[in-house]
Amino acid sequence: MNPVRISDALLAVAFDSKRDLSEALDQFYAPDYTHRSDGKTLDRAEFAEMVTQARTQIVSGTVTVLDELRDGSRYAERHVFEITLADGSTAKREIAIFGSYAEDGRFHHLSEIGFDLPA
């Protein structure tokens, strides 16, 4: 399997509410996936719960990749995402992600850090 990209994962998992979430998670994230953000590490079930909650609030979104690097099983990427929420508000954030791939090319672990940008 070719290694996945976080931009494709975000589009499928967070922004495409019509797509089955379990199917999207299986495509991009290994069964033992862990996600670290804001000092807290989530297992795959907790990550799925977080994404499920986000999907109820996000109406639309875009991802612009700024930098992306793969080196063996290591992955790093920096992107800007812009979202529109159900209440009409918008958000724009720059995110840096560092992580690793599982042997099958799906994400095994990702750690992210980011900051808000002017909308």
Image (cartoon, grey):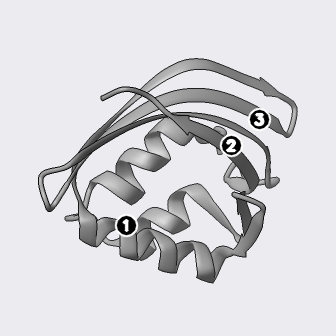
Indicate whether 28 appears above or below 83. Answer: below
Q: Is residue 113 found left or right of 19 in the rendered image?
A: right
Q: Quadrant of the C terminus?
A: top left
In primary-sequence order, the first of circles 2 and 3 is: 3
* Image quarter of residue 91: top left
Which residue position is annotated with label 3?
Answer: 75
Secondary structure state at the residue bearing disc 1: helix
Whether residue 100 can be seen here? yes
Neighbour tally class for label 1: few under 14, some 14-19, many 20 plus, Cα within 10 Å: some
Which residue position is annotated with label 1?
Answer: 54
Which residue position is annotated with label 2?
Answer: 113
Identify residue type, mark 1.
Ala
Looking at the image, which is closer to me, 65 or 102?
Answer: 65
Neighbour tally class for label 3: few under 14, some 14-19, many 20 plus, Cα within 10 Å: many
In primary-sequence order, the first of circles 1 and 3 is: 1
Is mark 2 in CB contact (under 8 Å) with mark 1? no
